[in-house]
Every structure is written in structure tokens, then in C-alpha cells.
Image (cartoon, rainbow, N blue to C red):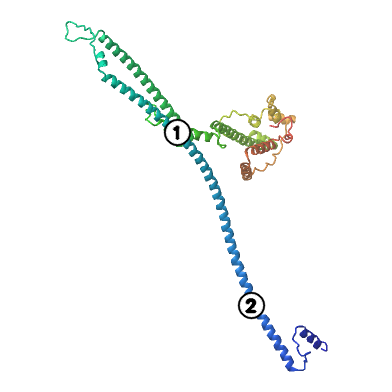
Amino acid sequence: MSVSPAYLNNALAARGLLRDGPLDFSSQSQCIDIIHTLLQKRDREFEAKEALAEKFARLSREVETQTIAAERLRTRCENAERQIDVLKGQLGSANAQLRQHQSEMKGLKDTLQRQKLATEHLKSQFSTDLRKKEKEMSRLKERIADPAITRRTNRPTPTISIAGYGTGHASPLGEEEDKKAKEFITEDSWRSLTETVQAQFDENARLTYLLQTIISTLGQLTTPSAESAPSSDGLVNIKPGSAEDLTSELQNKLDALEAILHDPNFVPLEDVLLKEQQNEQLRTKVKHLEEDVTHARLLAEEWRLLSEKNKQGWTTESAATPAPVPPIAKPKKEEVPMQTPLKQVADSMAQDMELQVALKDEQPTRKLKRIATPRPVREILSGEDTSHSSLETTPAVSKQELLARGDITLTPRRAATPKVDLVEKMREMELRKEREERMDTPTRTAVVDRELEEALGLRAPITTPPVSDEMEL
């Protein structure tokens, strides 16, 4: 508190508020004066700030207005500069045209001067010729008017006349022969001229018909809705003055055809037809391949079912009443000349299954050797011709003798294998079909071949169930 009065006195003195020495804080009048002075100063400063703020706002608005005006003037200036450039270009072209017209005018003036000189020359020559003719005419008039010349030229000349008898008219010698000769020459010339004109007219008609046919054909090639070609019933007569029209039309058609031929997107019709034939052949091959794959799948499924049944073996009861074998379902399809290795494998498997069915249907009194292993797939693919199976038969022996000798034994029936869940199989086939539809043709073919090889055992050694050399009947 002891330092505060001194600090305040120094601050007030620095701001020029102490006029009569340091402030006495115990005097109320001096404190009130200082406070009143401070309030007035604050009010003046506040008014000055408001005035400055208003002035700043006004100046800001003026600056914005001036900026907009300057931008507008700049835009107008740019437009004016562009117009000036355009006008300069027009002025240059106008000057070039003016110079061209001036040169043409100069040439026309020279031509006019030459024509004037030629006209003057012709005029002088004509006047000279006219004076010469006038002189000759005046000379002739003088000679005609001279009586001496007239008497000399009007002398009678002796004449001889021959009169004929029998007719009252006389004719010069050979007049009829000359007349006939003239008529003959006139008719011959007229006939030849008529034939020439007719041949020329026919030739013109044929050329006109050919030209109109060409124009119509070009129109059909260049435009989809072209006019039909002129009928070939008769020749077309060209109208007078239409040769220029035909020429212009032919030129237009040729220009359109040239534009079509030079078009980068133009594809010849032969290439399009060739590609269409190739696509059709590929579609046919893919269709046949899919049918072969479907057939092979069915055969592989039946082969698996028969293999599972063969694992169970046969008892005497089952031998007495053999179980019926379902027929092999072969899909109907057209004859396909294409033979693939998969098709050969499927045919070989079908033959093996038919042979096994035939062996199972045999009488139980016959003792058969075991069927040989089916033909390996690798042999089929390599084209080797090996026998599918071999049968060795023995004389018929009764069942009691076979039991007495111990050749056969009665074994209990094995437990039947669980039935194949057809619903699951169908679901798997549908899922596989959906995946194949999403694939392209080469990938689909590769996947189908791989699955078929796995089902047939081409990717692993083919194992057969352990069966004794002789099957129990």
C-alpha cells in the first residue's frame, strides 16, 4: 500500500493527467477530477474508435465495389482484346481479298486496254476496207456510166438452140440422168445417216441403263434404304440435260463408298461370315463335349454303384436269386463324329459293366474264373488293343459235391452298404453346374476333365477290391 500511491502518481504523470503536482489521495476533489478526466478521455477514445470502425467499414465496402468494378472492366477489356484479335484477323483476310481484287482489277484493266487496242485496230481496218470498197464502187459506177464501155459490152453474141420433136418442151442434154444420180446419192446418204444415228441412240441407251444400274447398286451398298435398281424390261431413255445429274449422283455415291471403305471400323463381310462359322463350330463342339461329359458322369456313377455291390460278394441264396441290376441309362443324343479319349473311356466302362451283368445272370451250376481287371484307362488313351476280360469255364458240378470237396463255403451275408443319398448328390451336381456356368468354356472343360479323371481314378493308381481267384456261386 505504501508503494501504490507512488505508482499511480507516476502512471498518471506519464499520461499527462497531473497538472498541479502529485495526487493527494486523501483529497476527494482531486480524486474526483482525475476520475472525471479519465472518463472523458475514455469517452473520446470510444467515439474515435467507433468513427474509425465506421470509416473502415465504409472503406471496405468501397474497396469491394471498386474490386467488382475492376473485375468487370477487366472482363470487358479481355472481351475487347478478343474482338480486336478477331477484327485483326478479319482485317487481314479483307486486305488479302482487297489485294486479290486489285490484282484481278489490274488484269481486267490490262485486258480492257488490249480489247480497246484491238477494237481500234479493227475500226481502222474496217474504215480502210470501207474506203477501198467505196473507191471500187465509185470506179464501177464510172465505168457503168461511160457510154463507150456500155456499147462495147452490149454486143449481141451468137447462140445455138436445139429443138426436139414429139414433145412441146425442150430439156438440156443429160438433165434427167443428173437428177436420178442426185436422188440416188441422197437416198443412200440418208439411209446410212439414219442407221448411224439409230446405232448411236441404242448405244447411248445401253450406257445410260448401265450407269443407272451402277448408281442403284452403289446406293444399296452405301445406304440401308437405297432405291431399287431400274427394271430390266427395257432400255431407259435419258432425258435431255440429265447427264450432269447422273454424273453428280454417281460422284456422290462413289464418295460415300470411299468414305465407308476408309472407315477404321469397317470390317469386310467375308471376315464376319468366317468368324460366324467358326463360332458356330465351336458352339457345336462345346455342346457335344458337355453331352459326352454328362454321359461319362452317369457311367462313372453306375460303375461306382456296381463296384460297391461287387464288394459284398455272393452267397448261395443270392446266387439262386440274383439281385436285379438296374439298366444302364444312356442319354439320347445325335451322332457326333468327334471321338475324344473320355468318350472311349466311357464306352470301355460300359462294355465292362455289361459283361459283368451277363456273368451274374449265368446259372449257379457253372464255376467261373474271376473276371480280369477292367481295361486300364491308360491303355485306352494310348490306343492299345487288349482284351477286356477272359472267361474260363469248367464242367458243371453240383453244389453238394463242391461243398463236400471244400471248394466253396457258405458265408453269411455281409451288411449292406448304406444307400447313396440322392438328394445330396443332386445338390452337389447343382452346385457344380452353377460353378461351371460361371466359368468360361476352356476352364469349364479343364475342371470337368479333372473331376472325371479323379472319379475314374486316373490321378491315382486304380485299386480293385481283394477277390479270390474263383468267385463263389
Q: Quadrant of the N terminus?
A: bottom right
Disc 1 packing (10 Å; few <14; some 14–19; many ≥20): few
Q: Which mark is residue 248?
A: 1
Res 425 quadrant in image: top right
Viewer-proximal residue, 333 or 139? 139
Q: Please, what secondary structure does the residue beneath circle 2 have?
A: helix
Residue at image point 58% right, 29% down = 336
22 left or right of 368? right
In the picture, residue 183 is in which quadrant? top left
| Residue 358 percent location from the top left of the image | 63, 29
- What numbered label is drawn on residue 294? none
Residue at horizontal 60%, vertical 66%? Answer: 66
Specify whether residue 4 is in view.
yes
Vertical position of residue 249 compared to residue 423: above or below? above
- Label 2, label 1: how many angstroms apart (C-alpha)? 85 Å
426 over 284 or under it: above or below: below
Give the amino acid type for the residue marked by disc 1 in the picture: Ser
Select label 2 or label 1 by which is in front. Answer: 2
Q: Is residue 328 visible?
A: no
Provide the secondary structure element on which disc 1 rests: helix
Residue 321 vs residue 106, the one in the foreground: 106
Q: Is residue 31 left or right of residue 98?
A: right
Residue 451 as seen in the image, left or right of residue 330: right
Query: Position of 154 compared to 193: left or right?
Result: left
Question: Which residue is nearer to you in this view: 125 or 2?
Answer: 125
Question: Could you say where residue 116 lies in the image, as x and y percent from the top left?
Answer: 43, 34
x and y percentages locating residue 440 in the rendered image: 63, 40
Mark drawn on residue 51: 2
Q: Quadrant of the C terminus?
A: top right
What is the crowding at mark 2: few (fewer than 14 residues within 10 Å), some, or many (at least 20)? few
Sooner in the amino-acid sequence: mark 2 or mark 1: 2
Amino acid identity at mark 2: Ala
